[in-house]
Image: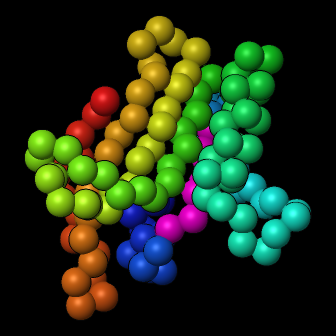
Amino acid sequence: MAKALLEEQGEFYPIGVCVDQEGKTMQRLSKDDTEDLPLASILVDQIQLDFISRLSAGTITAYSIVYEATVTNQQYPEPTHVLIAKFSGTDTDTEGSCFLPYKITDQAVEFLEPWLE
């Protein structure tokens, strides 16, 4: 879903996806009513607080929050655009982040090799 949105729009706004007790997937968007274009970090925090609460209450079994960022590391010493999918669930060892680097050239999105942390 995140790849398709980035390819269609050329930009990305944070989204959340969760799985309920029946295995049904639901998308979660957030809006800060104080601004027309709130900071992405505010939206990520809002979505995460909601999902943590729902996970603790047992109404969902897992969630992921996907947002855009720029990173540098050994593999990408120059600033590189990535989609980051932070995920967590009720099972043990189901917490982490998936990084999907990409570049946009001639209005086409090229996805590079992802990694997990």
Residue 90 relative to residue 102: left or right = right
Residue at 76% in and 35% down:
50
Judge by depth and name the residue closer to the eye, 48 or 77: 77
Image spot of residue 33 (x, y percent): 88, 63
Residue 4: name its quadrant: bottom left
Q: Residue furthest top?
A: 92
Q: Is residue 99 above or below residue 81?
A: above
Tell me residue 115's x, y (percent). 23, 40
| Vertical side of 88 occupied by 75: above or below | below
| The furthest residue to the bottom | 106
Does any portion of residue 24 appear in the rendered image? no
Q: Is residue 100 left or right of residue 45?
A: left
Depth order, front residue of 20/7:
7
Residue 108 falls in which quadrant of the image?
bottom left
Q: Is residue 66 magenta?
A: no
Asked if residue 115 can be seen in this view, the reply is yes
Q: How many marks on residues?
A: 0
Q: Against 91, is 82 above or below?
A: below
Q: Residue at x 24, y 50 (%)?
A: 72
Name the residue at the left extreme: 75
Query: In the rendered view, does 24 fall on the left or right side of 86?
Result: right
Q: Which residues are magenta?
A: 12-18
Pick the quarter of the image with the C terminus.
top left
